[in-house]
Image (tube, grey):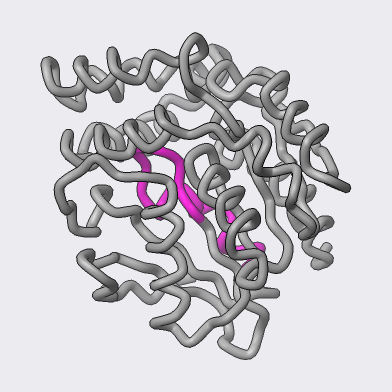
Amino acid sequence: MSSEISFIDAGDVRFRIARDGSTANPPLMFSNSLGATLEMWDAQIPVFAETHRVIRYDVRGHGGSSCPPGPYSLAMLAQDALRILDTLHIHKADWVGCSMGGMVGMYLLTYHPDRINRAVLGNTAAFMGPPFTDWNARIRLAHREGMGAIAEAMKMRWFTPAFNQSNPGEVARITDQVREATVTGYTACCAALRDMDQREAIKSISNPVLVVIGEKDIATTPAMGEIMVSNIPGAKKAVVPGSHIANCESPADYNRVVAAFLGTA
């Protein structure tokens, strides 16, 4: 299946987007983790392009999208997604986000609930500030040693040791996306996650939500996922094998639980 790759000018950013599936199908938007590109969802496309009009995009400062000066905010990242949907003349879409993409999804569900139908919040957290993550130290590391150092650290943070050993090619494919990211874009997004605390705000969410938890996720831990399950009224939960990028480490399990939630299984 060959995706349609194009660029959209929205606000102060040129976004690289990919589209798959029939425009007659309901729209489904995928949103990336910090440091990754839209290709992180490649294993989902053959499944969901059969049932949805799938839209993927590189977050500002990532991949082929442009990189305005930072720092960025979660509100800014959420507005970017809405501008892409507006440009495509889509009012409401289902949402699947991983890590940062899940955080953006929570913001949209809280402040723009009319724009989202069902939402999958995968391998994510409502709060990742200190003591859980020292974002300022990570920002300093990126500026001091470059994105190569960040990418190497992500190998063990994003995937289990067993997957690193058995699937080094897939680990490299995903972490090379981080390696190729710009320091400016990456650190500007780090600032958005550093300053985020959605633990109280998500209690107002009324849309259908599935929280996907990586069984061995050390970045956004199962305990962080359970907070979201408890705080989002009516939220459903699915635990899948693997660590932080579970959609790549365990694609069959991930696709199965997401398809069941979206009603396409």
Percent coordinates x, y for residue 159 in the rendering: 52, 23
Q: Going by the picture, which residue comes out furthest to the bottom? A: 24
- Rendered residue at 35%/20% (across/down): 135
Percent coordinates x, y for residue 255 in the rendering: 70, 51
> Range of the magenta residues?
31-49
Percent coordinates x, y for residue 130 in the rendering: 46, 13
Q: Is residue 41 magenta?
A: yes
Q: Going by the picture, which residue comes out furthest to the right? A: 234
- The answer to whether 119 is drawn above or below residue 113 in the figure is above
Residue 117 horizontal side relative to residue 148, left or right:
right
**Residue 173 sits in quarter:** top left
Percent coordinates x, y for residue 74 in the rendering: 43, 46
Residue closest to the eye, 98 or 224:
224
Residue closest to the eye, 236 or 257:
236
In what quadrant of the picture does the C terminus appear?
Answer: bottom right
- The answer to whether 35 is drawn above or below residue 106 in the figure is above
- The answer to whether 194 is drawn above or below residue 117 in the figure is above
Residue closest to the eye, 42 or 28:
28
**Residue 27 sits in quarter:** bottom right
Residue 16 horizontal side relative to residue 51, left or right:
left
Q: Is residue 61 magenta?
A: no
- Rendered residue at 88%/47% (across/down): 234
